[in-house]
Every structure is written in structure tokens, then in C-alpha cells.
Image: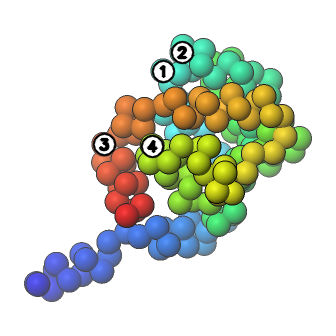
Amino acid sequence: MTTMQSHSASFRPSLPRLTQCAKVAQPLIPETIRRHTLGVGLNHTFSKALRRGELDFLHGRQARITVPDINLDFAVTLLGQRLQVSLKPVASDVTFRADTRSLLQIMAGQVDPDTLFFRRKLAIEGDTELGLELKNFLDSQDPEGLIPPPAYRLITSLLL
């Protein structure tokens, strides 16, 4: 193995490394940038679903997503045809709580939300009907159609 190969192998991304980096870096990034990045990312990822009205059930409702292992806590609501992100969620209608690995497994389509729920890796609290609508929406998405191929490959490699 060459020195270059040795160095690149040692820098291979791992989920524990990335979660630690996210946990440390997140408080250093201004709230406006974090909120904007999440909003742009979610609106881009779900743009087709937004156009088709598949997220209309979020109109005037707050869904809170909490990822404790990276200290991420935000809420999403639908305003017009765009998802609005708040990093200071107050009264949410439903809360989804899971660690990074579990959320990536859902994103990659490797595990359905029900399995994680019954394994107690995904907690859903609050409005049961809204929680089911959101869970079913996420479960119905085609990860390879939503996530750009390089990002999808990275996510699946992190889950190995």
C-alpha cells in the first residue's frame, strides 16, 4: 500500500466520526445558516412531493425532528408550497426522535420506520394521526430518486 493509499484509507468517513464532527461543529455555525441549509435541502429533496401536494398534511402543523446524538432539534411546517424550518421549536404537533444511524437507515431505504419504532430506535410522540401521515410519507419515498447518487453511496457506505 502506498503512502497516499494509506492516508486516504485512514480518512475514510465513518458514522461515529461524522456524528462527532456534526455535534462539535453545529454550535459553531450561525443559526441562520443552519436553518437556511436545512430549509433549502428539505425543499429541494421533496420538491416533487411538494408540487404534488403530498405534504399538504403539514399545512399549519409543526413536525419536530430531534436527533439527540448530534444535538439537532428542529421543526418543519408547510407555508404555501414550501417547507419552513425553525431551529427553536416550541409547541409541535408531533415529534420524531431518532439517532443519526436510524435516520440514515430510513433515508437509504434500508429499514422502514415501523421496524425502528418497534425496536425503540424511533420515537413518535404527539398527534398520532399526523405522526402516521409523516411516517407513511417518508416510507413511500424512493431514496435513490430523492438523494443524488454520490450522497446515496456515501450514506449507504456509512451504514456498513
The image shows residue 22, relative to residue 52, as above or below, that is: below
Q: Is residue 82 left or right of residue 111?
A: right
- Give x and y (percent) for residue 50: 57, 20
- Pointer 3 or 4: first along the chain: 4
Q: Is residue 119 left or right of residue 46?
A: right
| Comparing labels 4 and 2, the label whose residue is closer to the camera | 4
Check disc 4 and give the amino acid type.
Answer: Gly
Quadrant hosting residue 135: top right
Q: Residue furthest top?
A: 52
- Pointer 3 or 1: first along the chain: 1
Helix, strand or loop at mark 1 = helix
Q: Which residue is mark 1?
A: 48
Helix, strand or loop at mark 3 = helix
Q: CA distance from mark 4 to mark 2?
A: 22 Å
- Residue 109 numbered tag: 4
Q: Residues within 10 Å of mark 4 (few under 14, many from 20)?
A: some
- Give x and y (percent) for residue 30: 65, 57
Q: Residue at x 87, y 44 (%)?
A: 90
Q: Residues within 10 Å of mark 2 (few under 14, many from 20)?
A: few
> Is residue 5 visible to the viewer in this orientation of the structure?
yes
- Pointer 4 or 1: first along the chain: 1
| Comparing labels 3 and 4, the label whose residue is closer to the camera | 4
Contact, mark 1 vs mark 2 (Cβ under 8 Å): yes
- Residue 149 numbered tag: 3
Q: Which residue is mark 2?
A: 51
Q: Residue at x 65, y 45 (%)?
A: 35
Quadrant hosting residue 52: top right
